[in-house]
Image (cartoon, grey):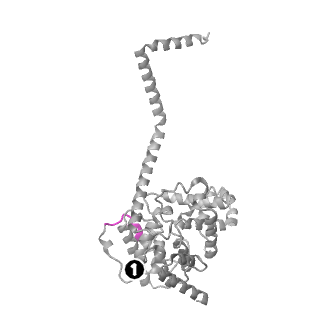
Amino acid sequence: MDQDQNEKCRAIEDACKQGDLSALVKLATSTGGLVTDEARRQAWPILLGCKTQFRDAAQEQPSQAWRKLPQHPDEDQVQLDVDRAFVYYPKDESEQSLDRRKTELSNLIVATLRSHSMLSYFQSYHDVVQVLLLVLGESSAAVAVPRISLMRLRDYMLPTISPARKHFEIVSAIVKSADPELADHIAEAENSFALSATHSLFAHDIQDYGDIARMYDFLLAHEPVMSLYLFAAVTISRRSELFEMPADQSDILTFVISKLPQTLDIDALIQNTLMLFEKHPPHRLQGFVWWRVSQFSVLKTSRKTYQHQSLEQAEDLARKQIEQLRREELLQKRLKLLARYRRPLLSLTAALLVGAMSYSMRRSGQDRYVWSVLSAIMDSLPRRP
């Protein structure tokens, strides 16, 4: 490390000792981020809001209480994904060392799912946990994984993809606000192109360990919505490339946008992301997309990074969000059923109204008057020869 990096590491250490979250956010956001994994092991716990828990976890083995809990329905898929983990990093490790890491990775994921059974697993979740494991080690990662799951990734770990779709709409709205011409050009592409990057906090797509660790410095220092602004910044940075593709080739556009370039200037992207966020904050995005986001979404419940929630509070929000989703799903089913039987219902309603009117008129004696009027009208109509 050079002198500037050494000084920065000392500044990070001082901020950690003082619990100065504001200083840590600035250091994590500045060029080069938190510099080393040693500094990250001190800073990430504070950014994640569980410094005391981390201090205790670092001195003991992870709890094994989760092993006695009921199995989670997604554990088979977890194992399939863990088997193909650690492809790009770490490099030059023995088969035995990689097997040990895979066991640790599996334990971290399964422990989190069993302990917080309202969460559902998604493919690429293991990429997120893998980064935390490599930086923090197994014991500290055992504390970090539940927090990042419940407080940053929760919208992707619910029974339906509907909350995640709101994230994709926000990405599209950011691009439209910042670059309307580009937004029009890629309008035919499915906005799910942001799924791979955003739900793994870019860990599924970035293959360089130093780059993804640097990216996490920034993401953990800011509110969850910042990952959506980051993806929008990446998309806008590829403007020239995307304009070379026909606007009506939606499948190709969707595929290309979803695949991040392998060479990224992380620090430049971070600065562009912050500019986007400042110029086009969530509540000013077009189409009222921010107001359509659930009040229980992590995008809204984790906005104040300096006010960390407890796991119990996050679990309660998850349950409320799931209940809201169930009510919305039930309402949608009822609306579809109503639309399906709309015409028969209208016909039945009309028939009932006519019957009721006829009965009422017969009782009041007005039926004869009505029939006489109708007869007069019929008589006045021209007859066919």
- Where residue 61 appears, as percent x and y from the top left, is 35, 81
- Residue 12 visible in rendering: yes
- Where residue 306 appears, as percent x and y from the top left, is 49, 71
Q: Tell me: residue 22, above or below residue 160.
A: below
Query: Pointer 1: residues within 10 angstroms few (<14), some, or many (20+)?
Result: many
- Residue found at x 45% / y 67%: 151
Secondary element type, mark 1: helix
Identify which residue, 81 or 211, lies in the foreground. Answer: 211
- Residue 263 visible in rendering: no
Q: Left or right of 213: which side holds 119?
A: left
- The quarter in which the N terminus is drawn is bottom right
Identify which residue, 315 or 106, lies in the foreground. Answer: 315
- Where residue 181 appears, as percent x and y from the top left, is 69, 58
Q: How many labels does the image show?
A: 1
Q: Tell me: residue 63, above or below residue 333.
A: below
Residue bounds of the magenta highlight: 70-79
Q: Is residue 72 magenta?
A: yes
Which residue ends up furthest to the left in the rendered image? 68
Amino acid on which the number 1 mark rests in the picture: Ser
- The quarter in which the C terminus is drawn is top right
- Residue found at x 32% / y 76%: 64
Q: In which quarter of the image is residue 258?
A: bottom right
Q: Left or right of 73: which side holds 239?
A: right
Q: Is residue 206 magenta?
A: no
Q: In which quarter of the image is residue 324?
A: bottom left
Q: Tell me: residue 91, above or below residue 341.
A: below
Q: Left or right of 37: which side holds 264?
A: right
The residue that disc 1 covers is 139
